[in-house]
Image (tube, rainbow, N blue to C red):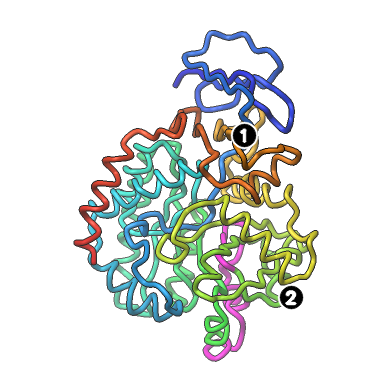
């Protein structure tokens, strides 16, 4: 793949040179002398790990603004699911291209997706140079007549995934306990466990979901999944907003990973009292996501970080809640650990996934506290250069193919609507 030498970058407040060989950080030091294929003069730009967006639906960039001011179930049943029936491969390809463009522009290098027509999405993301986890989504809406076809399609995609590059990981996506039959939840879980795959599921996103679970099963969604025998360290539970103490104990017991999606939760009014402290103290790995653009309207992890911290501080009445170092961790290394990928940290031997941040502007003046400025003062326009897997995907805010992507999405979205 080649080599890149970053000269005079600021890493945790100290000027360093950073050498990347192939896809990994090879050396980090004071004065590295090396004839690299590419040399970047950072000139005081700060280096940060690439963000890990742990829950999104990439190609829903096509649906940005499609269903505003609606409750979640109304939004899903009367807006999103009907529109998704009109999706084709070309739409998903360009929608995924747009998602990749937006994530690159905002400093994300890895994302955990859950969407349809995965082959088209993988093609788009591969071309864009980002790292992704791509699922086969199980959503039978309790119709068991679809089971055999779903099983066949899942196995077919799994076999195809063996030809993907090392940038992409196959996973099982189970939409939610309220939209998937218990038979298919268990089948998807078994399929994943037998093959060492991750399982990505929406869990306790709304109070309605919890109430329905108690009505139908007599227990919370978390206890319901425990009864089905599907919880384990391979499970990534998106939202996990309406959790009891018992739910948290169970998630910790089974080493389930949790994704906080604050902007989507706020916008759909799902809730805001995400129990970060309790989950963290129980030993649960808490990560951060944006959700899809149809509900959160953007894929900007910096914005999600700021909102997550402000809301935690506000509802707890405690300004010490979700401090800056923990906030950075849930957006980077926690996600990498949840996915089993050595990303989210600037360290020799880890994947070279990072951004250079331009601090020569008003938002970083004075630069007394870099993380405070990055999260509370700046916005993603400060992200100057992005490298993923040792490949430059944006330099000086320029992403190859940007205008073509925007033109094609503007051509296609009207067909979808």
Mark 1: give few (<14), some (14-19) or many (20+) Cα within 10 Å: many
Position of residue 13 relative to residue 210, above or below, is: above
Residue 197 point in image, percent of width and height = 50, 53
Q: Label 2, on which residue?
A: 245
Label 1 sits on a secondary structure element that is: loop
Q: Is residue 402 left or right of residue 42?
A: left
Residue 101 point in image, percent of width and height = 39, 43
Position of residue 4 relative to residue 84, above or below, is: above
Mark 2: give few (<14), some (14-19) or many (20+) Cα within 10 Å: few
Q: Quadrant of the N terminus?
A: top left
Q: Is residue 14 left or right of residue 21?
A: right
- Please report the residue visible at 28 percent of the width from the left and 73 percent of the height from the top: 82
Which badge, 2 or 1, comes first in the chain's sequence?
A: 2
Residue 63 point in image, percent of width and height = 34, 62
Question: For the magenta stretch, what is the residue range?
Answer: 214-239
- Please report the residue visible at 31 percent of the width from the left and 49 percent of the height from the top: 119
- Please report the residue visible at 32 percent of the width from the left and 42 percent of the height from the top: 123
Marks 2/1: CA distance? 42 Å
Q: Is residue 396 left or right of residue 326?
A: left
Mark 2 or 1, which is nearer the eye?
A: 1
Position of residue 287 relative to residue 143, above or below, is: above
Q: On the image, which quarter does residue 24 sit in?
A: top right
Residue 251 point in image, percent of width and height = 67, 67
Is residue 306 highlighted in magenta?
no
Label 2 sits on a secondary structure element that is: helix
Task: Tell me whether circle 2 and circle 1 mark residues in contact (CB < 8 Å).
Answer: no
Farthest residue to the bottom: give it: 215
Camera-nearest residue between 6 and 257: 6
Q: Which mark is residue 359?
A: 1
Q: Which mark is residue 122?
A: none
- Please report the residue visible at 69 percent of the width from the left and 70 percent of the height from the top: 250
């Amino acid at each position: 793949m080649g080599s890149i030498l970053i000269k005079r970058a600021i890493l945790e407040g100290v000027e360093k040179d950073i050498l990347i060989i192939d896809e990994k950080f090879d050396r980090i030091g004071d004065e590295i002398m090396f004839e690299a294929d590419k040399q970047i003069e950072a000139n005081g730009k700060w280096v940060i790990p690439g963000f890990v967006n742990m829950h999104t639906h990439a190609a829903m960039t096509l649906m940005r603004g499609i269903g505003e001011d609606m409750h979640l179930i109304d939004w899903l049943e009367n807006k999103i699911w009907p529109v998704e029936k009109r999706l084709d491969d070309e739409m998903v390809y360009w929608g995924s291209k747009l998602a990749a463009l937006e994530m690159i522009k905002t400093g994300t290098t890895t994302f955990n997706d859950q969407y349809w027509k995965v082959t088209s999405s993988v093609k788009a993301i591969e071309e864009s140079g980002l790292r992704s986890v791509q699922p086969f989504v199980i959503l039978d809406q309790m119709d068991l007549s679809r089971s055999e076809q779903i099983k066949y399609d899942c196995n077919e995609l799994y076999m195809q995934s063996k030809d993907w590059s090392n940038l992409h990981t196959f996973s099982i996506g189970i939409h939610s306990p309220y939209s998937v039959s218990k038979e298919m939840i268990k089948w998807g879980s078994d399929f994943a466990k037998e093959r060492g795959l991750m399982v990505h599921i929406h869990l306790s996103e709304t109070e309605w979901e919890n109430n329905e679970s108690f009505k139908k099963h007599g227990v919370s969604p978390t206890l319901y999944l425990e009864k089905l025998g599907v919880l384990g360290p391979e499970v990534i539970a998106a939202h996990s907003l309406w959790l009891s103490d018992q739910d948290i104990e169970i998630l910790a017991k089974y080493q389930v990973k949790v994704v906080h999606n604050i902007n989507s939760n706020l916008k759909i009014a799902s809730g805001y009292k995400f129990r970060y402290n309790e989950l963290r103290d129980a030993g649960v790995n808490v990560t951060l996501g944006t959700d899809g653009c149809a509900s959160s309207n953007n894929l900007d992890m910096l914005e999600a970080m700021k909102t997550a911290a402000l809301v935690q501080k506000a509802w707890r009445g405690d300004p010490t809640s979700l401090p800056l170092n923990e906030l950075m961790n849930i957006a980077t290394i926690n996600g990498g650990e949840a996915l089993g990928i050595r990303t989210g940290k600037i360290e020799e031997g880890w994947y070279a996934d990072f951004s250079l941040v331009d601090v020569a502007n008003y938002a970083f003046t004075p630069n007394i506290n870099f993380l405070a400025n990055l999260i509370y003062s700046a916005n993603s326009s400060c992200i100057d250069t992005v490298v993923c897997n040792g490949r430059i995907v944006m330099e000086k805010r320029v992403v190859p193919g940007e205008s073509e992507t925007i033109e094609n999405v503007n051509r296609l979205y009207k067909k979808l609507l």
